[in-house]
Amino acid sequence: MMRTNSQSGSRRRYYTRYLAHYTKKNHVILLLGGMFLLGVVFGTLLVRTAGGDLVELLLRLIGNASQRRREAGFTQNIVSGLSSGMALLACLFVGGFCAVARPVVVLAPMLRGMGFGFSAASLYLRYGPGAAGFVGAFMLPGMVITTIAMLFCCNEALHLSGNLWALLRQRDTQPYSLRIYCARFAAAAVLWFLAVLLEGALYALLPSAFLLA
């Protein structure tokens, strides 16, 4: 019995140390993820304070976008999704080369979360539980994957921007490879492309019952 308790205590200490090490090593990405979730909360709360005309306008935009994606071909949906995603990644990529861009990079996940929260809450306000199918089938999968890609890009941009700021202040910095920076952004672009493919496939394969009327 004492041996079992000792083993259980050892496992708890191991997991505690591992969690502390993981948190310390990835604290920037965890912070950025928290900013995204905070944005989702803010976006959801904004629906309560927004005027009815603004919510109605957003619902019309979402409905029109959904209708266009239903009518558009698979290739056109891929091109449309990639264009906006690559524009965002390009902005983050360039932001990494700016020593004073860190506040903007940190705010990017929160703004994206606000957009998702506001859109999802508006749909729920209009369609009730019936919006869960649309949000869960079409908005959430792609949002999760693209947000992960964006968070890693934000982390890289913050790292490079911080190094440049330290150089301007004539402080010691750790060496940073631009080749690795470009490779990680390229990997994020591939991940974004896969997310867009998934969204296009969902629109093509899932039954129309998941779509908004």
Image (cartoon, rainbow, N blue to C red):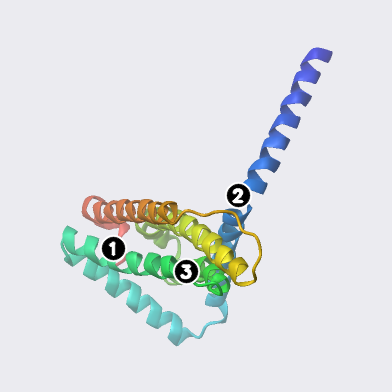
Q: Secondary structure at mark 2?
A: loop
Q: Which residue is mark 2?
A: 26
Indicate left or right for 199 with 114 as reference. Answer: left
Asked if residue 73 is positioned above or below residue 16 in the image, the reply reads: below
Residue drawn at (17%, 60%) of the image = 75
Q: Is residue 66 above or below residue 146?
A: below
Residue nearer the viewer, 210 or 86 = 86
Which of label 1 and label 3 is nearer to you? Answer: 3
User: Percent position (x, y) of residue 99?
Assistant: 54, 72
Foreground: 63 or 130? 63
Kind of residue sitting beneath label 3: Phe
Count of number-bearing discs: 3
Q: Residue at horizontal 48%, vertical 66%?
A: 96
Residue furthest to the right: 2
At label 2, which amino acid type do we have?
Asn
Residue 16 position within the rendered picture, expressed as x and y whole percent measured from the top left: 72, 36
In this view of the protein, can residue 1 be seen by the observer? no
